[in-house]
Amino acid sequence: GFDIIQYHRKELRKDVFKHAVGLVADQGETWSKFRSAVNPVLMNPKTIKMYLPKTDQVALKFVECIKHIRDPATQEVPDNFVEYIKYWTMDSVGLVALDSDLNMLDNSAGHPKAKIIIDNMEEFFQLLLELDMQPSMWKLIATPKFKKIINILDLLNELSMAYVKQALERLEEEASNKPEHEQSILERLASKDPIIASTMAMDIFLAGIDTTTSALTACLLTLAQNPQQQNKLREELLAVMPQKNSPLNQENMKTLPYLRACIKESLRLYPVATGNFRTTGQDVVLSGFRVPANTDVSMTAQLLLKDPKYFQQPDQFIPERWLRSKALAEAEHVCSASKGDPFVYLPFGFGPRICIGKRIVDLELETVLSRLLRNFEIKFDYPTDDIFKTNIINVPAK
């Protein structure tokens, strides 16, 4: 967990978070209890698939938004297109976390609270990097940057909790006797523990904005840079979606292996997370070095993802390496990624601490990319040097 978030929730705002400080902030037995409460809901494929129709509607709105904002003469989107990706992200994440569509794509000006959240997230991650991942005196004295991040945390929590409270009140007013398998994520969590539901909804909402934005940006960039693979993906989509507005459903989404391979390859080349973080529960020996208990360990995977030892032609965008067919991989003169070390590529982590939002992100990316590739040809004719910058996560720099 991040010490500053833990301190903020356990010490400064314990009246708000009580026994549920969340997966990002907690450790040990209390973390395990929280994870056990939310895991059956958020990691259940059937639960997430319920959101496909609504997620698809947001993707279709994004398509219409792009048609509206692009230059009629050049067909180019504006320089601040990343902001619109964030609007799509907030609308998509809002469906899952808050049981509601925020309609940022339709009317971002009508949602000043959401805009404030977007504007503060990048600075929050940068300060978190400087205070929790780099040497800092904040545990001894309240430094200016410490005061700044606490103010941002208060602001983000206040604004996001307002959305959560509104959603919970609406669910209470609309109380129904739906069977559990038809209930939304927020409904199911709230029926077990309203405090856990509030914290989890807020964390999905806040953690999902910049991370999902970065993931979609990476996918669009790699497809723009590789028109041959983009066309191949479009051919796969044409078989499933003969018309641009053909419906997406659980059955035809299963027949898009190349789409999923493109997403995996994009996140290999441009990973959202810089690696995985763990705190040692006891003294351990790693590669001959003794690491004491309670030491924060950062496992940076970015170099491994470009290492020819694990990935042939590592700088090339070759989605075929992720396909199960050995023949397809060999046709591109690469070994199937399944033959390599399974722990090299872990964009969502692994094991009990695997990203709780993995299935949500998978659904969002697969849906929106299907719609975008079916409606547009994607090009990017500008330099791509330093297109991402790193704080806690990799985010678009431009």
Image: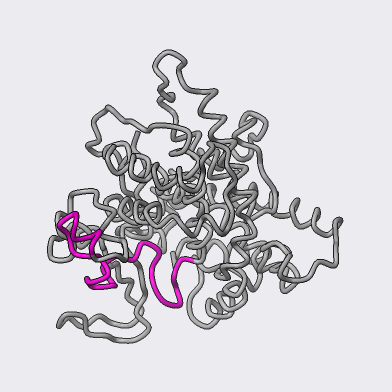
Question: Relative to 119, does residue 289 appear above or below in the rendering?
Answer: below
Residue 123 drawn in magenta: no
Q: Residue at x 67, y 65 (%)?
A: 197
Residue situated furthest top in the rendering: 73
Q: Is residue 371 left or right of residue 218?
A: right
Provide residue 47's location: percent of width, then percent of height.
63, 66
Question: Residue placed at 45% from the left, 43% from the top?
Answer: 238
User: Who's the residue at 65% across and 35% down the image?
Assistant: 111
> Residue 44 appears at what percent x and percent y?
58, 70
Seen from the viewer's position, the closer of residues 251 and 274 is: 251
Find the magenta span and give its range.
327-355
Q: Position of residue 166 (x, y in %)?
A: 75, 51
- Quadrant in which residue 339 is drawn: bottom left
As for residue 349 lying within the magenta part, the answer is yes
Rendered image quadrant of residue 104: top right
Q: Position of residue 133 (x, y in %)?
A: 33, 60
